[in-house]
Amino acid sequence: MRWFLAVAEHGHVTRAAAELRVSQPGLSRAVARLERELGAALFDREGRNVRLSRYGEVFREHARRLVAEDDAARRALAQAADPGQGEIRLGFLHTQGASLVPDLIRRYRERYPRVTFRLLQDSSARMTAALRTGEADLAIVSPRPDDPVFSWRPLVVERLLLAVPAGHRLARRRRARLADAAGEPFIAMRPGYGLRAITDELTRQAGLRPEIAFEGEEISTVCGLVGAGLGVAIVPPPPQGEGVRHLVLGDTAASRTVGLAWVTSRTRTPAVENFLAFAAADR
């Protein structure tokens, strides 16, 4: 499985063999044997290069999960006697990179200094995908994943803000309702980000069908565009951006819960279980 994934990643048997430190003929025979066992051609050959066939595309996701399970099992066996060491693969949202995640890791490593972290930062959709494939052990996301394959523990509830340009008609207020922003262009995160789903639902509840003027992948970009006078945005705390005023949203549902998600059925190392218990108890 690992050899198959290496060839799929490199698109070249010789380069994959060099990375794996095996012979090119041996790797080619192994791939051919796998294809015979599966009864399907996993690669299409294009000169010296190879690319995944449609069967290979299907098989790759299963191979990733099998390798992830094998890795988790090996780590669990190696670390079973000592949850105070090992590696935790933690995914998190861009918006949690400034305070929540650094604070959690700092305080956890004060107690368990031998534990290391491998961090992955991206959208909620990317985080749940990383959990599925085993690329991440835990992910800090919002909103709660609706797929029953995931378990979830809430960590913090954030009151959402309405970001408006400093010279905006609402800028002198301290609070506002989304209905007050009727007719305004909105700056939003791209689809696939949890905050975009929340924005869409809140504006729907408020009876708004806003024009999405721009879409971004970073809260700092969204707030920068608001500061440039290009629209308004629903954002989490803490406030960001020059030339931006942040108003507390008075809408009842204008909050989001940020929590830890993981694949319920997947084997977790003692270090991961220990961090999960620590993060949940701390909040």
Image (cartoon, rainbow, N blue to C red):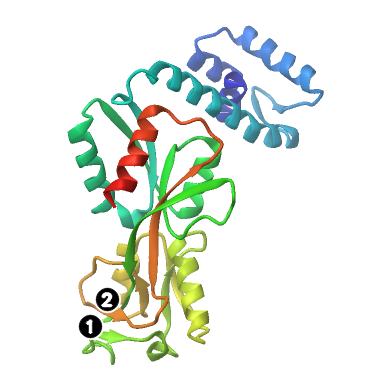
- The circle drawn on residue 227 is 2
**Residue drawn at 56 percent across, 57 percent down:** 146
Q: Where residue 217 sits: x, y (%)?
A: 41, 59
Q: Does the rendering let one see residue 206?
A: yes
- Residue under label 1, please give it: 166
Q: Is residue 46 left or right of residue 263?
A: right
Give yes or no for contact between labels 1 and 2 (Cβ–Cβ under 8 Å): yes
Would you place residue 35 above or below residue 212 in this image? above
Would you place residue 95 above or below residue 255 in this image? above
Circle 1 packing at 10 Å, graded few (<14), some (14-19), many (20+), is some
Q: Quick one: quadrant of the N terminus? A: top right
State the CA–CA distance, disc 1 to disc 2.
7 Å
Q: Where residue 50 sits: x, y (%)?
A: 66, 27
Q: Does the rendering let one see residue 88?
A: no
Kind of residue indicated by mark 2? Gly
Q: Is residue 250 left or right of residue 124?
A: left
Would you place residue 245 above or below residue 48 in this image? below
Q: Where residue 138 sits: x, y (%)?
A: 42, 41
Q: Secondary structure at mark 1?
A: loop
Displayed quadrant of residue 13: top right
Closer-to-camera residue (222/264): 264
